[in-house]
Image (cartoon, rainbow, N blue to C red):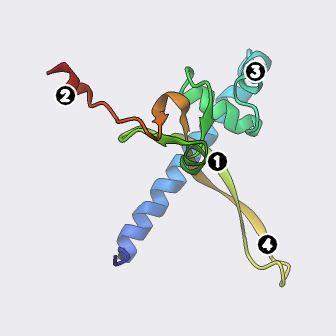
Amino acid sequence: MARKTYNAEQRAEAKQRRQDKIADLRAILANVETSPNRFGIERMAADTHPGYSLKNQLLIMHQRPDATRTAGFRQWKQLGRSVNKGAKGIAILVPMTIGSEEKGDTRVIFTTGYVFDVSDTRESGEQEIDPEAAAA
């Protein structure tokens, strides 16, 4: 299978979309950090989504308040579950180290990653039910 190629304009648009998404996520975090209910929100996030950084917990809560257990696509596969077709991911900030350790010029940048709630998954052996077909 051939790898898809993108022209310079498409790459620039994708980069701008990523930067806009990260700016949106940072704005959400800034709103929470200045909220008078900040500590109650942080406590609830820590209880609901352990294993994620506080900021990612807050992002998950803001985007999907009903989320109970979240994991990435590959993590759900390892747990024997499949993400439902068309499920919308919950955007979080993922650290990425770039540069060369040999040269000593490494730095950490953040990119957007996505996790899915358990309600967006099914057991791997289960057939996905099409709601439109079931209604007919």
Q: Position of residue 68 (x, y in %)?
A: 61, 24
Which residue sits furthest bottom?
103
Looking at the rendered structure, the secondary structure element under dot 1 is strand
Left or right: where 41 falls relative to 28: right
Looking at the rendered structure, the secondary structure element under dot 2 is helix
**Label 2 sits on what residue type?**
Ala
Q: Which residue is mark 1?
A: 93
70 or 112, nearer to the observer: 70
**Label 3 sits on what residue type?**
Arg
Q: Indicate whether 95 appears above or below 89.
A: below
Image mark for residue 133: 2
Q: Which residue is mark 3?
A: 38
Which one is closest to the eye, mark 2 or mark 4? Answer: 2
Disc 3 residue crowd, few under 14, some 14–19, many 20+, Cα 10 Å: few
**Label 4 sits on what residue type?**
Thr
Left or right: where 76 falls relative to 98: left
Give the distance between the C-alpha atoms of the residues marked 2 and 4, in whole angstroms.
52 Å
Disc 4 residue crowd, few under 14, some 14–19, many 20+, Cα 10 Å: few
Which one is closest to the eye, mark 4 or mark 3? Answer: 4
Can you say which quadrant of the picture contains the N terminus?
A: bottom left
Q: Indicate whether 98 appears above or below 75.
A: below
Q: Position of residue 115 (x, y in %)?
A: 56, 42
Q: Position of residue 5 (x, y in %)?
A: 36, 76
Which one is closest to the eye, mark 3 or mark 2? Answer: 2
Looking at the rendered structure, the secondary structure element under dot 4 is loop
Q: Which residue is mark 4?
A: 106
Left or right: where 91 falls relative to 9: right
CB under 8 Å between discs 3 and 2: no
Q: Position of residue 56 (x, y in %)?
A: 68, 38
